[in-house]
């Protein structure tokens, strides 16, 4: 009888410890599942952001070449750009949702930190794309003013371009920094 109690106590002790050891609790398994899903979707979103960047380059070349110089023309490319980036935003939201699920779990702090960094990286990438849409809106307004006969100075167009450039660069750099920190954390902790 004494042996059975000792064996039962040992089994309970081992089972209790397993819950607290990293990788052994059910929340850890869930965290790993969410991170794998989030990483896969985040990679798809990253690919879509590359497509968006190519779209930005194409539109900027059109604007610089003077191919688009009316408010209607700018509105058309803005609509096209928003349509082209819809998949990027959908994938970004989907990835952030998976990472957000990790934040609801208990006892998986390293996983939570990784999820936070990935959410930050995705959010900054979204800000970069949003900044371009805002720039197109401002350019459209200036083109409309020009078309209506309102005097528009070259400095106004340059200011719009510089503002976009600064916001885009800052958001892109922040996205990269967060992504790099997440990757280091992932490697260091074998996530």
Image (spheres, helix red, strand yellow):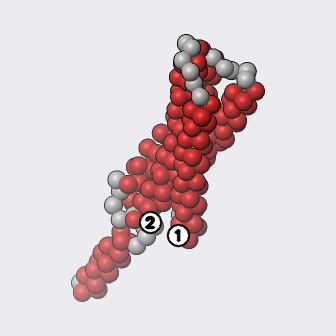
The image shows residue 171 at horizontal and vertical percentages of 54, 48
Is residue 39 found left or right of 60 in the rendered image? left
**Residue found 53% across the figure and 22% down from its top:** 141
Question: Which image quadrant for residue 3?
Answer: bottom left
- Kind of element beneath mark 1: loop
Q: How many circles with numbers are drawn on the protein?
A: 2
- Kind of element beneath mark 2: helix
The image shows residue 58 at horizontal and vertical percentages of 72, 31
150 to 51, vertically: above or below: above
Is residue 63 found left or right of 81 in the rendered image? right
Q: Which of marks 1 and 2 is nearer the N terminus?
A: 2
- Residue 110 is labelled as 2
Marks 1 and 2 close (CB-CB < 8 Å): yes
**Residue found 35% across the figure and 65% down from its top:** 107
Mark 1: give few (<14), some (14-19) or many (20+) Cα within 10 Å.
few
177 to 88, vertically: above or below: below
Q: Between residues 94 and 107, which one lies in front from this camera angle?
A: 94
| Residue 117 seen from this side | yes
**Which quarter of the image is occupied by the N terminus?**
bottom left
| Residue 36 seen from this side | no
129 to 150, vertically: above or below: below
């Amino acid at each position: 009888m004494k042996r059975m109690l000792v064996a039962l106590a040992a089994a309970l002790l081992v089972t209790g410890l397993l819950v607290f050891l990293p990788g052994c609790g059910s929340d850890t398994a869930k965290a790993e599942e969410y991170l794998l899903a989030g990483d896969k979707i985040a990679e798809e979103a990253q690919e879509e952001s590359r497509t968006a960047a190519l779209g930005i380059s194409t539109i900027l070349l059109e604007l610089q070449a003077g191919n688009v110089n009316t408010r209607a023309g700018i509105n058309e490319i803005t609509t096209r750009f928003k349509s082209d980036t819809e998949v990027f935003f959908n994938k970004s939201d989907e990835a952030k949702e998976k990472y957000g699920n990790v934040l609801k779990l208990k006892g998986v702090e390293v996983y939570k930190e990784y999820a936070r960094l990935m959410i930050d990286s995705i959010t900054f990438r979204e800000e970069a794309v949003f900044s371009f849409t805002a720039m197109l809106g401002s350019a459209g307004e200036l083109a409309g003013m020009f078309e209506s006969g309102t005097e528009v100075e070259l400095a106004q167009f340059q200011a719009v371009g510089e503002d976009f450039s600064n916001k885009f660069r800052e958001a892109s750099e922040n996205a990269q920094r967060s992504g790099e920190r997440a990757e280091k954390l992932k490697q260091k902790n074998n996530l």
